[in-house]
Structure formats: C-alpha cells, structure tokens
Image (cartoon, rainbow, N blue to C red):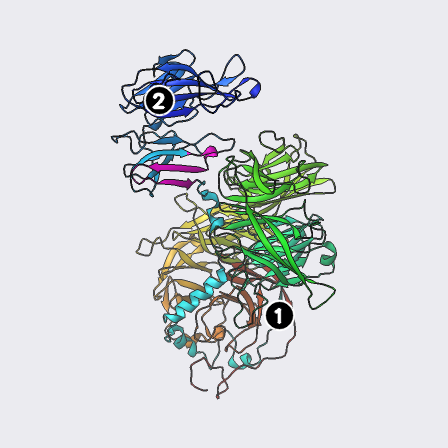
Amino acid sequence: GKDHGLGPKLITALKFSNCWGKDGEGSECYLAAGAADGSITIFLVDFALKIEATLEGGGMYAKFSKFKGHSGAVRQLDFSKDISLSSGSLQPEYLQSNCSSFELRFWDLSGKKEMRASDKAIRRTHWSTLTCPLGWATMGIPAKDSAELPPVDMAPTTDHNMHDLLVTTDQDGGLALSRFPCLAGFRHRTYQGHSGMLSSVRFTFGGQYVVSVSDADLAVFQWRRHLPVDPRVEHLLAPRQSKLAQAAAHLLRQEAVGEFSTLKPFAETIKQFRTVGFDGVTPEDAKHATIKSDLLLQHVHGCKGNSVPNTAKYTSSGAAVFAAAAVLVVQGDVQQETLFQGHEDEILCVAVHKATDLVATGEAGAEGMICVWDCSDDARKKNLKAATAVLNVHKADESEADRSKIHREGISALAFSQDQGAQHLVSVGNDQDNIICVWDWRRGVALATIAGDKNRILCAACNPFDAEVEDEGLLMGSLVTCGENHVTFWTVEQVDLMPGDDETRPRRAARLVGQKGVLLGKGVQQTALSIAFKEDPDSPLEGCVLVGNQDGSIYIWNRRDGCWRLDNVVPDVHLGPVLCIASATLAGMAVLTTSGCDGMLRIWDRKSFSGENRHKVREFDVTNATRHCVATSRWGKIAVSSLDCTEVKNQLRFLVGTTSNELFEIYLDDLKPETSPTATVMVQGHSSGSATGLAVHPRQDIYVTVGSDGYLRAWDCESRSAVLVHQLVGADGALQAGTCVDVCPADVGENVNEVAVGLSNGQVVVLRFGNRGEHVETVASWEGRASKKAGRPVTSLKFSPDGGSLAVGGSGGGLDVLNAQEEYKWVAEAKGHAGAVTHMDWSEDGEYLQSNDAALRVLFWRKFRPSFRLQDKPIVLSKHRWQSFTCTLGWPTMGVFQPGREGHGVNSVDRASDKSVMLLADVSGNVALTAYPTLHRDVARKEYHAHSSPLASARFSASGRYALSLGEADLCVMQWKVSKVEEEAEEVFVDEAGTPRLDGEGGG
C-alpha cells in the first residue's frame, strides 16, 4: 500500500473498469480504490505486462491519479460506459462515488478533477455499472431512508432483449427486485432468505444469477433469475385436462352427493301419455321402432389453436394436416379431405415425418393413446383410414391388474426420429413429471423412459443432422425438448441387445441421457416455445438448434467439447413470444419462417441467421394478408400459433394457424419484396370460451351457431363453408356472448334469413342477412322486461311455426313471448318454471308450447291471446302433433338416460322430420342415433365419437341429409352425412299391459 501511495489506510471500496486497448486487444483498465478517509486512488492496469509475484511500483499497476473530497469512508464506485476516443481505443471517462456521509460525487478521469452533478456531460453519461444507491435512478428503492447506504446493483447489459432491472434490499433485509430506473412510487418484488440486513448484492456476468451477502448471518445466497411467464403464453403451461373426464367426474360428484334425486318432477307429467302416446306416435308404434339411418362424419369446422400450438403441418405433397377435437384432418381441398377417427379424447399434439408422410397424434386423458397414421396420397386414395399403429401407454412388463402407465394424463408432445424410415417415436407425457418415452412404434414397444422436468415441457424435436446413427452406442439421433424454463438436449444410448420373440428382429433396450443447455451469461432462463435446426459449418454432423423464446428472441445452441452451449442470441425476432419456427427450402433458398403473438410472418435467410448478422428476406402482417377472408373481417390483430411452409408447383405456401382457431393458407409466387401475398381460409370456428347455440334453417341446408366469443356464424352444408361471421353487440354497443339462437321459419324475403340470438346480458337481438352473408342488418332488439329477472342470460329461444311468435326462456325461469310481426314487442309471460328454461317446442298449429327447465320440469302452455296459460291436464295434448321435438324430457325420450340419471347426461335431442329416428348429444362427446320414440334404455342406439368435450347441441338439417353437432368446449362444429339403412325391428321392453314402462313403475 505504501509503495502505491495509499499509505496505511483502510480500503473500503474497489472497482475495476471495463478493459480497453489498441487494436481491440482489451489489455488495459482502471482500478479505483476508495479509502476510509474519503480519498479515491486510480490505478492504470496493464495486463500485457508480466504478472509478478509481488506488486511493485512500475509493474502491472501504476498510479494514475488521486481524488479527495468525500467527508466519509467511500462505499461505492461506478465507472461510466465506454467512450470512443480519437485514438480509437475505448475507455471510461468519468467515475461516480458514494460515501458513508451520504454524498454523491463525480470525477473526470481524463482531466483528473471533480465534476458537478449539474454539468451536461454528467447528465448525459451512461454508467457501465450502478452500485451507488444515491442518485436519480435509485430514488425509489425501498431502503433509501435507512441509516446505512443500502446495497444496489443494476442488471448488466447483454446482447439479447432483457428487461432493465435493479436489485437492492428492503427495510426488513429481504432481496428487492425493481425496474430500472427505480423512481419514487415504483413497485418492487421482495424475496426473503437472510436473517439480517444485506451488506452487498451483485448480478453475475450475463445477469442470470444474483449473489447476496449479509453481515448479520454471515451467509452468501445465490438466486437464479428467470423471466416471468408472459401472460400471452400462460395458458400453454396450464394442465391440459380431459374435458370429457371432467364432465364424467362432475356427474359422479352429483350422484355421490345425491343431486340425482329419486324425486323426478317430469315423471308424473310423462306418465299421463303411457297408454295413449304422444306426437302422433302410439305405444304400439314404439314396439317396432328401428334405427333406419346411419351417420358418416363429412366435415369439421374448427381446429386447435388457442390452447395447443403447432398442431397444423404440411405433408410432402402439400396436404394440410391438423387436429380438431378428437379428429385428425388431412385436407388437400375442402371437398377432398380425409378424416381419421380413432381417438377417444382431445388430440393434444401432432408430429409429421415428411419423408414418409407418417403422422403421429397423442390425446389427453388417463386412457390417452398414441396413434400413427399413413397420410400419404396413396393411402388416402385407397381410403385407408385405420391407424397404422396404436401405442399402449401402459408399461408392458406389468400385469393387467397392477400395470402402471407411462403417460398417466395423456401426451403433450410427439416427434419422429429423422432417419429415412422413421424407426422411432418420442413422446412427452402431460403429467407433472413430463415423462419422456422413446418407442419402437412399429412393434409397440417402449424402449426408454425418463422424467423430463417438473416444469411444463411444450415441444420436442429430433435433430435431422445426426439422424443416421453411426455410433454403435447410440440407438437414434439426438433430440431436444423445450418448455417453461427448460431447454434440454437428449441422447438415446443403447445399453444392450436382447433377442426377442422373433430372432431376426432383436429387441433393443436403451436409456435417455439429458444435458441442460449452458447459457454462458449470454442469455436468461425463460419459457422456450419452439424448436428448429440449421446447418453448423463447424459441426456439420450435429448442426445448430434454434429455440424461440417468450421475449421475442431466438437462441442458437451449438455443441462444443461435448457440451451444448448458447452460442448466439438473435434479439427482437418478434415483438413478443416466438411460437413458431419452420425450416424449409423455398424458391431455391434455405430459409427459416417465424411467427408468434405479434402476428407477423417473417422469412429469414437460414445460412446467415446468427446474432445481428441476419438477413430478412420477406415479412408481412398475417392480419392484413387475410383481411379479405370472412373469418377476419371484423377482428383485430391475429396471433399465430402454428406455422409450416412448403413449395408446390413453384408456388410458395404457408400454413398459418391462429390462436382464434382459424387455419389460413397464404401464397407467394416468389420471395421478391414486391410480390403481394394472397390467402384463403381453410378452417374456421369459434375462437374462445364455449360454443352454446345451434339452430338450422327450416327450408334450406343452412345452420347458425353462437358462442361466448361474441360471434354469430352461419354455415352452408353444401359448400361446407362459413357464409357469415358477425359480431354480437348489445344495446350498449359492447360485445356480448351469445347463449342461444333460432331461425325464423317465416318467409321474410327471397334468399333472406332472419335469426334471433339470445345474449348473456338478457337481451335478444334479431338479425337479417342474405344466403351468402351479405346485407347484414339488425331489425329488432329486446332488452328484457324491467323485473328482477332482467339482465340474466337468455337460455332458450323458439319461433312458432308461422314465425309470428318468439318464445324466450331465461336462466331465472322466466318465459316470455314476443310478437315477431310487431317488431318483437313483448305480449305475454308464462309463469311456472323453477329453473332455467332449457328447451322449448311449439305444436304444429302454434297454439301450444312445451318447455323443460333445469329443475327437471315439463310444462305445457296454451295460447290465450295475448297471454299464455299453464295446461294443467297435458293428457288432452296426446293427439297434437309438434312442429319439432327438441325437449330432452318427454314421453318419446324416456329411455335415452342412464339408470338413476334421468334428466342428466343428455344435453340435446332432435327428432327427424319423418319421425323415424332421434339425434342425441350427450356429455360424453357422443352423437347418437336412436329410434323415435325411445321408451326404454334397452332400445338399440348407434353412437359416433369425434368430439372431445360434452356437446352443446345436435340437429338434423332441413332436408334431413345432414346432421350437425356442436362441441361445447372443443369449439368444433361437425357435419355428418345421414344415410338410410334397413334394420331388423328391435324389441322394446313393455309391461304386462303391453305398454312401454317408465323405470321404477313396478314390475321386475
């Protein structure tokens, strides 16, 4: 100390500046030493000189200057950020310091003098570090009024997009994290751990960790920093539970607590028709009831986009593959599509092997399975719809009685190995351990399993560069998984070879070995959302791994010396989460296509994609490119959740799925900037919440649906397309959720439709539009009556056969009738329901109305102009014929419910116009055909499964050639073709008197 001019003084603060030097050598820096007497000594350090065992004058450390001015011990020191000098070197120009007397001073290093805080040069200076707690940028730190100077540090600047952060301490000794600059009134997050006040806090290089030290407990804590989950991707990390399993569990809970009471209010009403029949059908007719129809799934409207990303892919021939509810759809043309049905629950993930056109799908639920399909053009032409393989997720080496499951809650991600034959398949479980499994899928054997991570894994991909394994110790090429604070690289090691049942095909055993990526201070841990691969000139057999992140950046990982390291950060690829990355060769150029929550589709030169040295070939806004499509005519910004690209007949095609459950195909003739994109909508459906209402046109094969997304949609059965997408707006101008809908049967004009929509705020809106969705206008609006029930959601709507009256059922049990011929003026109220009105039907003459409610009541009403009166003797209506039969509770539907669950489990029924068959929609996701009437549960039933949630409704079209079903939570609208078949008559269970018997009415 004496040799360097410090003297025998207590050193209280030390700070190195950044390094600088001529020709970028970076061999020189400053060292500032603050002393207890308030002095600061500056040393010039030259690392190019030989490091000597003892520091002697004239060695590496040479005294540069000395400053005096503080009245207390110097506590903190900070150098300014690099300043460019005329010599071409970079070195700091200023120093700031704090002392124990709460003084802030500034020093000019080149002029070797003190500066004033008011000097312009100081006000414009950026600081390389910020550890001084006294200053404008730290005015809002929580411990600013403490007796001692609180420790503080600013997150270092890195080459990726990071939030500016400040770490300090609070009044209670906790670690406090706040924004930088931290001004008065700013909020901060506090983390407890130390038992006393902190004496120092520092970010590590790269800002990934924070280290804290306390004088009181003498402990050193290391804190790991990660970016909080972006709200736009939080739903992706939520558990993906089976909606069908939830519905089944809800019924079991209701049954357990006795909600399925033995008292069934509807039973007494229905019994009156036991000997005389109903709706022109007698008990004798019921004896010979048969199912003379069959259903074939023909088209699906909707796809998975809002909750499951990257489920839409291209095959090698350019056909689009995507998941919709429990169906895999392969679509080359809207009229030439293949629907693969084999799953029992929602498809959560899709993987495509481009070389073979094999497609793997994984479903949700405890019984979730994996199916592999041949989606090649040849297989589709041969109409081969059966799964090539179905993988059992149970462990094969355990008995049937106690076997456990590899994937206990379904499958969340799949990836084929990238060898030419796609020999292996990788699956990731939807459970809390995110189990990873490698399959020999052709044999149905699980070769290796391992717990992936406690954090949610969102994506898995196999490396194409090392796909053809030459190392005898490896079973297949490497793979990558990413998710919430998770990027892991896996190898599949072959541990032994054991002969199987077929000696010519040995059974291979393997194990998965994982290695977490090392950030090396270049990035920060965050949620990773997408994976792609690119060439690596330094490692051609392994390539680079590209991972899209929630902060809009893409990390480029390389393997060096056996370790996967973050080699480069490409910042600001998108404004927000990068949900999609696709690698392809388009127009002879190797490209990467990226997109995400900002709705921009960007095309990059793959070879030059590295850090700041990136070449953007094209970009366009998906919202603008699809503006003309009916699906987006009224929406705001589109967020992209799925992306793939291909080239077909010299045309560049981009398959774009959105978070609004739409699927677009965008076309480019070339990659020139002046070429404008064109687009078509391939698939659309309701975007969020639940789908609630379905109604058919009485004379045309057109139908309408509504949902809680606030849109009315009209569909054409013949063209299998949407003809109208219209916002539902209440009287206050705000978007309102639709709850129910009906189509007016009256002729209001040539090719003009009139539709009534019930809203969640209790209003009814009546719209008119043309057959092709043109000339939409609101012709009437009813805001409900001023009563205690006003404002409650409308739950049911039904036009009379002549279209002159509209019955409106509410969630509070109210039933009102509007006069459609007088601008939907209120004319009558029907009182008697004890719960929400769920279904209604008019008689053919329009004089009677029957209704169901949530309290399991069946009521009949007679029209006494202008009022409606309760029909206390329903037996007099036995000979009346009804325009429709959609009430789930009634004499014709006595046998559609499970034992003990009468009134529950069936959400919708619809009678065919010829009264030969009924269409059912239940909570198990099934569409079913049963005879009309169905008086006992033993009557045969045909069930068809394609939905992945309870159904909201199902209806026959006007011509009877189609059946339509609406999934409540899967948001899919499905169109079924109705065909006539001949079947033998089914015997119906009857009592001794020869009449069908309601369960519980005596007998054995």
Residue 167 in sight in this render: no
- The picture places residue 336, in percent across and down from the top left corner, at 69, 54
Identified at 42% across, 85% down, the residue is 1002
Q: Amino acid at mark 1?
A: Ser
- The picture places residue 330, in percent across and down from the top left corner, at 65, 54
Task: Describe the element under mark 1 as helix, strand or loop.
Answer: strand
Point out the image quarter for the N terminus: top left
Q: Indicate which disc residue 34 carries.
A: 2
- The picture places residue 226, in percent across and down from the top left corner, at 45, 41
Identified at 34% across, 64% down, the residue is 831
Relative to 925, is 668 above or below?
above
In the rendered structure, which disc, 1 or 2, sits on the residue that comes first in sequence?
Answer: 2
Q: Which one is in front in this view, the residue at disc 1 or the one at disc 2?
A: 2
Q: Amino acid at mark 2?
A: Gly
Task: Describe the element under mark 2 as helix, strand or loop.
Answer: strand
Q: Is residue 533 magenta?
A: no
Residue 905 in sight in this render: yes
> Front-most of 134 and 771?
134
> Front-most of 895 and 247?
247
* Label 1 to label 2: alpha-carbon separation: 92 Å
Relative to 105, is 254 above or below?
below
Q: Is residue 207 magenta?
A: yes
Q: Indicate which disc residue 293 carries.
A: 1
| In contact (CB < 8 Å): disc 1 and disc 2 | no
Relative to 385, is 519 above or below?
above
- The picture places residue 67, in percent across and down from the top left corner, at 35, 15
Q: Indicate which disc residue 25 carries.
A: none
Would you identify the image quadrant in which residue 2 lies?
Answer: top left
Question: Residue extending furthest front?
Answer: 53
> Front-most of 758 and 870?
758
User: What segment is highlighted magenta in the picture?
Assistant: 203-224
